[in-house]
Amino acid sequence: MRQLTEITDDPKQTFDVITEDNQNFELGLEYSDQQQGWFFSIIFGNLSINGMRLTTSPNILRQYKNILPFGISIAVDDLSEPFLIDDFITERVKAFLLTPEEVEGIEEDIYNQ
């Protein structure tokens, strides 16, 4: 599990993420004042995931567990949701890149699957 430390308080940001096995994907984040929250998009190969709300989750990409060779965990210090523009720079919210083994571990430990 590697923390994604590239995230800033810029309301619209995109960056490349390299997985442990040297695969590359694009992660986009956008903050909405009106909805008081963060939204994410991912481009990995031919797969595009667009405009999903970022929520506290052991793996926000769980529904893609059989498609993506990685996951992303979102942890919030006060057990609420990411809703402040400076959540990542204050580290109230942390995002972690998960390996396939960690995704599998979460499935077993949390979802009993």
Image (cartoon, helix red, strand yellow):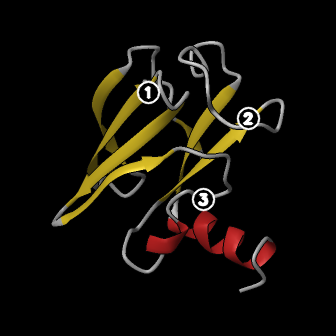
Q: Are marks 1 and 2 in contact (CB under 8 Å)?
A: no
- Residue under the image location 68 percent in, 75 percent down: 107
In depth, the one of 18 and 106 nearer the eye is: 106
> Which mark sits nearer the N-terminus, 1 or 3?
1
Task: Give the image quarter of residue 29.
Answer: top left
Disc assigned to residue 59? 3
> Which mark sits nearer the N-terminus, 2 or 3?
3
Give the farthest residue toward the left. Answer: 46
Vertical placement of 15 versus 20: above or below? above
Which quadrant of the figure contains the C terminus? bottom right
Q: Position of residue 22 (x, y in %)?
A: 31, 53
Q: Are marks 2 and 3 in contact (CB under 8 Å)?
A: no
Vertical placement of 47 versus 35: above or below? below
Q: Amino acid at mark 2?
A: Val
The residue at which mark 2 appears reads as 76
In depth, the one of 21 and 96 nearer the eye is: 96
Q: Are marks 1 and 3 in contact (CB under 8 Å)?
A: no
Vertical placement of 107 versus 98: above or below? below
Q: Secondary structure at mark 1?
A: strand
> Which mark sits nearer the N-terminus, 1 or 2?
1
Task: Give the image quarter of residue 104.
Answer: bottom right
